[in-house]
Image: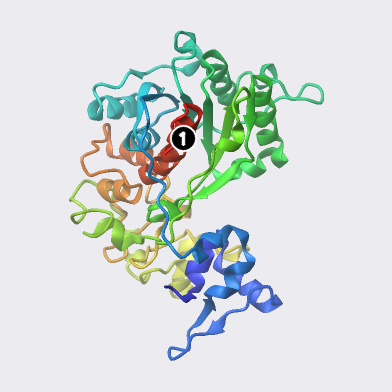
Amino acid sequence: MKEYYSLSEVADLLSVSKETLRRWDRNGKLQAVRKPMSNYRVYNKDQLKIFDELDFLFNTEENSNFVKPSKDYFAIELFAGAGGLALGLEKAGIKCLALNEIDHWASETLRKNRPSWNVIEDDVKNISFSSYKRKVNIVTGGFPCQAFSYAGKKLGLKDARGTLFYEFARVVKETMPPICIGENVRGLLKHDGGRTIEGMVSILNEIGYDVLPPRLLKAIFYKVPQKRERVLIVGIRKDLNSSLFSFPKPYKKIYNLKDALQKGELFDSDVPASAGQKYPEKKKKVMELVPEGGYWRNLPVDIQKKYMGGSFFLGGGKTGMARRMSWSEPSLTLTCSPAQKQTERCHPEETRPFTIREYARIQTFPDDWDFQGSTSQQYKQIGNAVPVNLAKEIGYSIVKFLNVINGKSN
């Protein structure tokens, strides 16, 4: 049983920065202790009991979210991308009835890997799903968080016209599944001062759904070697009992970059070779000076100033710049490109960005999931995806709920 947690581990567990923990240490909210023998500053496990979200650390047994479907369950997925969410739901036993995606190369990826899937490549605004009414168990979608135009005190479906959330809600209304799930980035919680997510809840309520309090899921707790977070908005049709749905329980073990790229529990082989971006020679020379787990502040000051330019004199940590990943930690959240200056994702040993297959491994895609399009298109598809393992755990929660409302819990 783990007794001590490092600064990095606690930062990951609580989704705060290391600097926040140092500030808490200084003001007495959570003070680090000296680990016996090594004298490293760490946190005793018992100190973490003050955080409700870390209750799972104190359970004596590792949980499993696995549950088997008692019958066939069918999903419609909007904004399907390269299939991370759909593949995860499939692994949980949910069948995809239809997937909508406007991007051509992402649609090609879906068709290439699952020829049997009904992939609808078009703008969702042009598609009616009314023929699926009462024939689908779940509608999912990862829509962007666009602000709404407000009319009166209560936001209604018509007020969200022109946004992709409107289209998501429209499809839910057309099909009326027992459950709908919207997923998004953490920023949705504070978008437009919180009014955007309030509007989404109001709209789903109007069309016949009770909405559970939005939940932030941290991928590192669901067998994903990446510090990625997704917000889930879960709506349960009002003729059903919304309290029967429960979010997936987190796992204690946190996987790191070594688990992602080398043979082990997550994958039964080392990551296969594949194409990838390269650094220009000038940038490569700078990145070669950054140690494993380091970033721009680890460079000599004269090189810092030259590399950072005006940003050198601005406030803030800018910890994504000139950042080299560490084998012993989960990867930082992947972006649509592994070599953007603000969000650098450099290999821990080799001075290069992650390759396509390394990117896919970090998102827990299987090695045989074949991405289509140019290298940049493939990076974009992977970077935008829901991690497959996280999606699978969400899928188990859906299956468990559907089993119960169908009278066959297990």
Q: Is residue 355 left or right of residue 400?
A: left
- The image quadrant where one finds the C terminus is top left
Name the secondary structure under disc 1: helix
State whether residue 288 is above or below residue 409: below
Residue 226 % position (x, y): 41, 54
Residue located beneath label 1 in the image? 398
- Relative placement, left or right, of 216 versus 26 is left
Which quadrant would the N terminus be assigned to in this image? bottom left
Circle 1 residues within 10 Å: few <14, some 14–19, many ≥20:
many
Q: Is residue 111 left or right of residue 99?
A: left
User: Residue lying farthest top?
Assistant: 131
State left or right for residue 317 relative to residue 348.
right
Compared with residue 203, is residue 83 higher up or lower down, i.e. above or below?
Answer: below
Residue 60 rendering spot, x and y as whole percentages: 46, 65
Instruction: Name the image quarter holding residue 282.
Output: bottom left
Q: Quadrant of residue 330?
A: bottom left
Residue in the image at 49% along x and 63% along y? 59
Residue type pointed to by label 1: Ile
The residue nearer to you, when weighing 108 against 392, is 392
Q: Is residue 16 visible?
A: yes
**Residue at (36% x, 25% y) in the render:** 72
- Residue 327 vs 138, above or below: the answer is below
